[in-house]
Every structure is written in structure tokens, then in C-alpha cells.
Image (cartoon, rainbow, N blue to C red):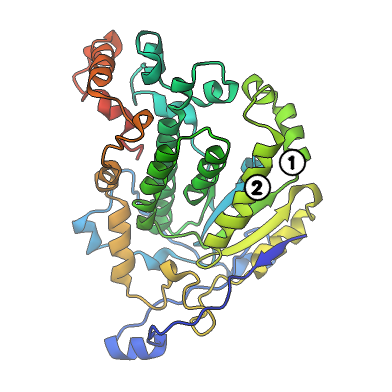
Amino acid sequence: MAHIFQGPLKRSTAKFLHPARFQAVVGITLPQQSANLTSVKGMQSETLKSRGKPWNYEKHPYNHFYFFIDNTLKRFNDNSKVIVIDGNIGVGKTEFGKKLAEEFDMHFFPDVDSNEIFKIKNRNFDVRMVNDVLPVHARFCDMPTFYEQKVPRPQLLRFGYTQLQIYKARYFNYLKALVHILSTGQGVVVERSVFSDMVFVDAMRKFKHLTSPGHRHLHHARTNTICELWRPHLVVYLDAPVSHVREQIQKRNLPWEVKSPVLTDDFIAEISNVYKNKYLEEMKSKSEIIQYNVTDMPDWEIIVEDFEEVDLEPHLDADPFKFVDWMASEIAEEDYCSYRFHVSQTQEHDSLFNFHIPFDAPEMFWNGEDAHLLRNYIDHDPAVETDPDYRGWGALFKSPL
């Protein structure tokens, strides 16, 4: 059955102006958001407010001009919420997320494809093609290579850099989800939260798959970028015992997973431990949490009732920090529009990832000699050399928005 975790009650000395008094002071009326989700297939579906015509954010990215002519909250209804689906390997996050999105008329954002981070966008070029001509310590390490553990350790340590790029891809995936909900009013379901990326980082460090400086740099990257993102309203954690995860790995039958010396029972258990003891503890102060054990899932009708009953409305007297990012009844329309403008500025967010060079973690960057060699092979490859729009190999890791 479902278990809903409530964050601990917190007292704060901060003074909040009651919505009614706020409206009286500024002379405006702010829209009140509903506390509960509403299934579009249920008996209450007729009460769900229409969102109206969505803003085409792909064709017309929100800018300073649009800021003054298109409001944000007018499109919000009961289901204008952000939900993330988290859990261990093979617990059914994709299927659950898709079904949930369909039930509540939300847009589903699947987890990122780790293979895409090695490809120069819109080009027929994969940087892993040059591994054979690079020194071992400078070669790219993708997920299959890491899980198989058949290459020298200097290349395996390069997975720390790969993990940083996976985090960055998830950051922009979640950013696009925020752009979607703020531009269309349609709620979003995101598979594998950017906020939970640190779960795998910490698990890998415990089993020495990351160096201490590399682990520290990954946390530095997260700390200095995650603060730009509004947290989800709801976190769904799909729990499973190690035996079930092992069974699902066998069913997926990916050779680099099935025979992996990395995916031991202890490693799988550690992922669950970090999820429960660190990630969920961190998230429950700002978001609501629903947890299911996938080996004892209730009927779908009961799951829908769980989601319709969970309270997603701020209660300032009880907990002033729950849903603090989304307090539409406490902030002006301009603040929502300002944040919508902020998340629409792709280059601004891309620049957040221009960190200092971690010289104590050489696996996280290329030294000058290796970078020159890599750049030379990529820039002179026929797939990119004749392309007038190619801006250098650095464009490989530009944001996907």
C-alpha cells in the first residue's frame, strides 16, 4: 500500500503576509491553486479547469517582450504540478510514469539517454570513435564500459566525467519540464529526478569507483547548479528489495548489466540506502513524498485515489517551507513570469557549468596536450570539418534545449 511521508514540522521566525492581506495591500487578486490532483478519467474530471491555449515555447522562447504580454498562472489548473519518479534499477519507473501522466493529463519526460552525451548534436559523430588514438587516461568511459570493468582503471575513473555530463543532461531535462509547465500549464512527470543524481555518485564513491576529489567535484557541481531549479511538488519513490532488482536486471538481459562486477547486491542495496536515508530526507522538507513497494503494489484505482488525496497546497502555519518554490498564492504573477523567463534562458544555465578546473581530480578534465589531440581528431573529421555551423568540439556538451 502507499505510504505518504510528511516532512517534520518546522518553526520559523520569518513573517509571512496572509494572502487576503497581501491582496488588500497591493490591490490585486491572485489565483488560488487547488490542493489536489484530479484524474481526467475519474468522476470529478468535469470539474477540472481548462488550461486554455498553450504558449509555443519551442517556436517562441519566452523573452523580455513576451514577459509583458503573456501571463503564466492563467493556464494553471489542479494538475499543474511537477512530479518526479525515482527508484532503483529496473523498478518500473518508465511504465509507472507514463501511466501516471496519462491518468492526470500530464506530459511525460523520460530519463536521459546516456549515449547521447557522447554525440555531437545534429552531426554523425560520436567522440567514443577516437578512443583508440587517445592515451588510456584520456579515453571516454560510457556506462557499458564502466559496468563491464574490462579496461584499465585510468579509463574507468573517467566515468566521473561521464557522470557529470549525465547530471548536466538531467539538469536540462528537468529545466525543459519547468519550461513546459510554466508555458502551457500542463503538469509534468519526470523520470529520474536531477535531484537524485547524487544517489549514484555517493554509492560509487563508497565502492571506490570515484576518487575522493572527483566525488567532491561532482557534489560541488550539484550544489552550485541545483539551486536554480524549483523543486517538484511530489516525489514518487518506487522501492524494491535487492532480489527483485536482481531479477529485473536478469529479465532486461543487457550483457553489461547481467555480468557486471559493479552491480553487486551490496551496490544495489547501497543505492536504496542513499535514496531512503539521504535523498528522501532532503526532499521531504520541500516536497510531498509517496512511496510504494513494487513487489506489493496496490490496484491502480487505489493508486489514483492516493494521488487525488495527497495535499499539495502550502500550509504556512504548519510548515512554511513545504512547496516554498510554488507558493502562487503568496507571490505576484510577475514572480512566476520572471522565473519562466529565467528557465527559458538556455545559455545562462549552460554557463553555470563552467566550473573551476579540479586539478586534484585529473579524471574530470583533459590536460592541454590531451585536449589538443582530441580537438584535432574531432575538428578534422569529415563529418564535422565541412560543416559551416560546427563551432568546435566544445559544442558537444552544450545544453539540449
Q: Position of residue 352 (x, y in %)?
A: 28, 46
Q: Earlier in the sequence, mark 1 or mark 2?
A: 1
Q: Position of residue 321 (x, y in %)?
A: 47, 73
Left or right: 301 in relation to 375:
right
Q: Which residue occupies 66% across, 19% down? A: 255
Q: Which residue occupies 26% across, 24% down? A: 367
**Residue with the mark numbered 1:** 242
Q: Which residue occupies 29% across, 45% down? A: 346
As drawn, the label of residue 272 is: 2
- Separation of disc 1 and disc 2 at Cα? 9 Å
Q: Amino acid at mark 2?
A: Ser
Q: Quadrant of the N terminus?
A: bottom right
Q: Which residue occupies 59% across, 65% down? A: 37
Is residue 332 in view? yes
Left or right: 144 in relation to 91:
left
Q: Amino acid at mark 1?
A: Val
On screen, 252 above or below 213? Answer: above
Q: 167 and 336: which one is in front?
A: 167
Q: For mark 2, give the secondary structure.
A: helix
Q: Position of residue 390 (x, y in %)?
A: 23, 22
As drawn, the label of residue 139 is: none
